[in-house]
Image: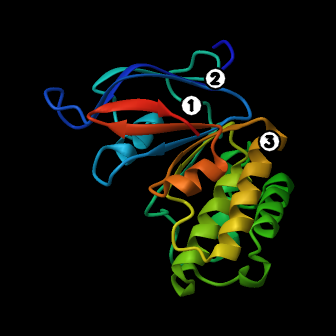
C-alpha cells in the first residue's frame, strides 16, 4: 500500500446495513502521523476503531493493513480499548509482558529476553516501576490506563489505535503519557488513531482532526 500503514476504502460501520453509524469513509494513515477522531458519545467512534482493529466486520468497504493485508500481520497493530482489557488478577509486569509477546516470535513461558526488555522499557516510559508486582485490581483507574498504554507500546506496533486512553489521568500524568506515546510514534515512524471526546486535548496531539457528524467522518482544522 503506497504511502500508508493503514488504508480505509469505502468503509461503513455499525450493526445494521440499513442504519450504518458512519459510512463512506476513505482514509489513509501515514507513517509518523497521529489522527484524532472526535464527536458526541454514542455516535460510532468506538465502533469505527473496533472495525479498524478487526474486532467487528465492516458493513461495507475494506480496511487494508500494510502491504495489502486484509488482517493486520501479527504484532503490527496495537489497541488500547476504552475498557482496557487487562488481566485483573495478574501483575503490572505480567500484563505488559503479554503485550511484548504479541510483537515478538516468543509466545509462551519462559519469556524471551526481547519480550522482557520491551516490557522494561515500556514500564519505565509510563512511570510504573514502583507498581511492577502490583495486581491490576489494586490500581486506580488512571494507573490501569497507564498499564494498558505500556502494554501497547511494549508490542511496538506499526499502527496504534487508542480509545479515550487519556481518561482518568491527572494533568501531570496525562502530559507524561501523552509525551511517551507521541515520542514512540515519532521515533518508530508508526501511526496512531485516537478517539478523544475533548477536542482541545485532541488538537494537542493530532496532525489531523476528524469529526463524526451526521453519519460522516469529516476533516476539520487541527
Which one is earlier in the sequence, the residue at label 2 or at label 3?
2
User: As displayed, is residue 9 above or below residue 148?
Assistant: above
Q: Nearer the observer, disc 1 or disc 3? A: 3
Q: Assess whether mark 3 and mark 2 are in contact (beta carbons under 8 angstroms).
A: no
Report the Cα–Cα distance between label 2 and label 3.
18 Å
Residue at screen point 77% across, 84% down:
130
Report the Cα–Cα distance between label 1 and label 2.
7 Å
- Percent across and percent down for residue 46 are 39, 47
Q: Which residue is label 2 attached to?
A: 66
- Percent across and percent down for residue 102 are 65, 48
Residue at screen point 27% across, 33% down:
215
Report the Cα–Cα distance between label 1 and label 3.
21 Å
Q: Which residue is label 3 attached to?
A: 186
Q: Secondary structure at mark 2?
A: loop
- Percent across and percent down for residue 195 are 48, 49
Q: Is residue 133 left or right of residue 37?
A: right
User: As displayed, is residue 26 above or below residue 184?
Assistant: above
In the picture as drawn, the residue positioned furthest to the left comes out as 18
Specify whether residue 16 is in view.
Answer: yes
Q: Assess whether mark 2 and mark 1 are in contact (beta carbons under 8 angstroms).
A: yes
User: As displayed, is residue 142 above or below residue 69?
Assistant: below
The image quarter containing residue 45 is top left
Specify whether residue 90 is in view.
Answer: no
The image quarter containing residue 31 is top right
Q: Which residue is label 1 attached to?
A: 72
Q: Quadrant of the C terminus?
A: top right
Which one is earlier in the sequence, the residue at label 1 or at label 3?
1
Amino acid at each position: 500500500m503506497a504511502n500508508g500503514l493503514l488504508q480505509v476504502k469505502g468503509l461503513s460501520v455499525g450493526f445494521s446495513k440499513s442504519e450504518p453509524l458512519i459510512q463512506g469513509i476513505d482514509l489513509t494513515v501515514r507513517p509518523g502521523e497521529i489522527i484524532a477522531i472526535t464527536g458526541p458519545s454514542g455516535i460510532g467512534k468506538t465502533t469505527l476503531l473496533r472495525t479498524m482493529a478487526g474486532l467487528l466486520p465492516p458493513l461495507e468497504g475494506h480496511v487494508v493493513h500494510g502491504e495489502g493485508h486484509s488482517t493486520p500481520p501479527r504484532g503490527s497493530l496495537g489497541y488500547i480499548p476504552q475498557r482496557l482489557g487487562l488481566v485483573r488478577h495478574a501483575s503490572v509486569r505480567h500484563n505488559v509482558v503479554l503485550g511484548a509477546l504479541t510483537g515478538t516470535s516468543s509466545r509462551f513461558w519462559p519469556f524471551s529476553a526481547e519480550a522482557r526488555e520491551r516490557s522494561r522499557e515500556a514500564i519505565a516510559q509510563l512511570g510504573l516501576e514502583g507498581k511492577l508486582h502490583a495486581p491490576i485490581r489494586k490500581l486506580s483507574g488512571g494507573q490501569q490506563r497507564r498499564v494498558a498504554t505500556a502494554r501497547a507500546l511494549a508490542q511496538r506496533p506499526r499502527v496504534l489505535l487508542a480509545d479515550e486512553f487519556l481518561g482518568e489521568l491527572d494533568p501531570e500524568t496525562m502530559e507524561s503519557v501523552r509525551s511517551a506515546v507521541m515520542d514512540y510514534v515519532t521515533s518508530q515512524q508508526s501511526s496512531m488513531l485516537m478517539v478523544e471526546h475533548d477536542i482541545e486535548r485532541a488538537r494537542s496531539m493530532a496532525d489531523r482532526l476528524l469529526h463524526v457528524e451526521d453519519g460522516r467522518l469529516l476533516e476539520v482544522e487541527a
